[in-house]
Amino acid sequence: MTVVERVGTQEQRVIDAALRCIARWGIGKTTLDDVAREASCSRATIYRLFPGGKDALLEAVTRTELDRFFTGLARRFDEAADLEELVVAGVVYTARSLAGHDALQFVLAYEPDVILPKVAFRQADRALGMVSEFAAPYLAPYVGDREAPRVAEWVARLVLSYTLAPADGVDVGDEESVRRLVGTFVLPGLVSPAAQ
Amino acid sequence: MGTDRKRRTVRSLVDAMAVDLTVRERILEAGFACVARYGLAKTTVEDVARASGLSRATLYRYFPGGRDQLLRDVIAWETGRFFGRLAEAVAGAPDFPSLLEEALLFAHRAVEEHEVLQKVLQTEPERLLPQLTVESERILVFIRRFLVPYLEREDLRPGVEPEEAADYVARMLLSFIGNQGRWDLTDPAQVAELVRTELLAGVVRDRR
């Protein structure tokens, strides 16, 4: 079931309630009772929807949020008319999604031990791989099939770097700022398939 | 106060500070050894006192925040040493692209071969990584400062300032040091290609 199909279902209501709880108290302190109260349902309902309890619920939350993110990213990509727009839109949308995600921001600030092991050193392979696999087909018409996954990974690194360690002069949530960053450092390094 | 006495006072102040630095280093080194042996969670002030041959009271004088501060400073200290070794290793490179290539080759190998880092990453990443993420801002400043003088001597593309280029290159270096992704950073040919494209294509004028 995709995000769109699940809107309005009880499953989605519980997931949204869990996100609000995490944004308020974090992953560690959020209990199924909290989520049940927030979603106006019973604990038993949550167990029925997510057999396995909190872990299963958290997994569903993560999956749903990734799904939501990638659905939005695809829409931005579809609207882009050229390579520059594609890269800029991807960076800005990703940076804003990360910065505007209350639950994620709470966890990054107060429970970094939960999330950083998934995006650092070798574990970053999964995150970088997921992003580059998703974005590669959109980049391929501009840079060729061979280069596309590499370029996607390159841009994903930039987003990750500026998100975890913000810079003084660069705002990855701002279109103009990203246009300058990408135009200066990324686009000159991209070869068109015709030139290969 | 006569000049001689003044000089002696200054000298003794400097000596006292030097001793202080040595004691601090001694504690940090012992702390690092303890982390290597017991890990971050199990290392205690007691362990570090024993390993350094100093008293608990002395340790608390240098690290009033106790265990937490001590471990934080051990991580910062070893991170500083790591990048110090890296800077030393590449300082003699013949030109800027080679310097970056050597940096990536050296740092990738050094991370892989850093036994304590690898052990902690495997067994207790949740204790190390929040700290390293905080450190990364300081590391970026360090790499940036290291790179600026080189960039000032390079033929930069129009509109590119050494400072912003240094920040960009520092971020890319740090990202690749942590994770090589699709690249094989043990292969000098791939590393040269990576430096030519992703690190420098937008920074320096094409040499060809």
Image (cartoon, helix red, strand yellow):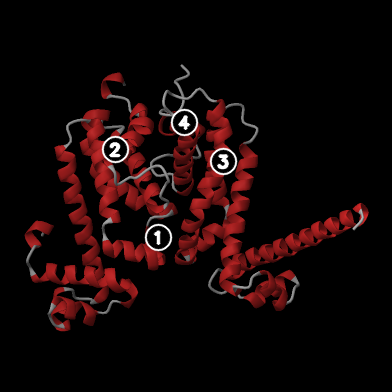
| Circle 2 chain | A
Mark 3 vs mark 4: tell me if same chain: yes
Residue B138 in percent (x, y) is at 53, 51
**B33 or A170, which lies in front?**
A170
| Circle 1 chain | A
- Residue A6 falls left or right of residue A56: left
Residue B161's label in the rendered image is: 4
> Which amino acid type is marked by label 2?
Glu
Residue A81 in percent (x, y) is at 17, 32
Q: Residues within 10 Å of mark 4 (few under 14, many from 20)?
A: some
**A120 or A27, which lies in front?**
A27
**Image: B56 above or below B4:** below
- Residue B201 falls left or right of residue B117: left
Which callout, 3 or 1, points to the residue nearer the camera? 3
1 or 2: tag closer to the N-terminus: 1
Which callout, 4 or 1, points to the residue nearer the camera? 4
SS for callout 4: loop
Residue lying at 64% horizontally and 67% vertically, measured from the top left: B31
SS for callout 3: helix
Residue lying at 42% horizontally and 23% vertically, measured from the top left: B158
Callout 1–callout 2 Cβ contact below 8 Å: no
Q: What distance separates the C-alpha of mark 4 from that of mark 1? A: 32 Å
Q: What distance separates the C-alpha of mark 2 from that of mark 3? A: 26 Å
Q: Residues within 10 Å of mark 3 (few under 14, many from 20)?
A: some
> Which amino acid type is marked by label 3?
Arg
Which residue bears the numbered disc 2?
Answer: A176
Which residue bears the numbered disc 3?
Answer: B145
| Circle 3 chain | B
> Which amino acid type is marked by label 1?
Leu
Q: Residues within 10 Å of mark 1 (few under 14, many from 20)?
A: many
| Circle 4 chain | B
Which residue bears the numbered disc 1?
Answer: A116
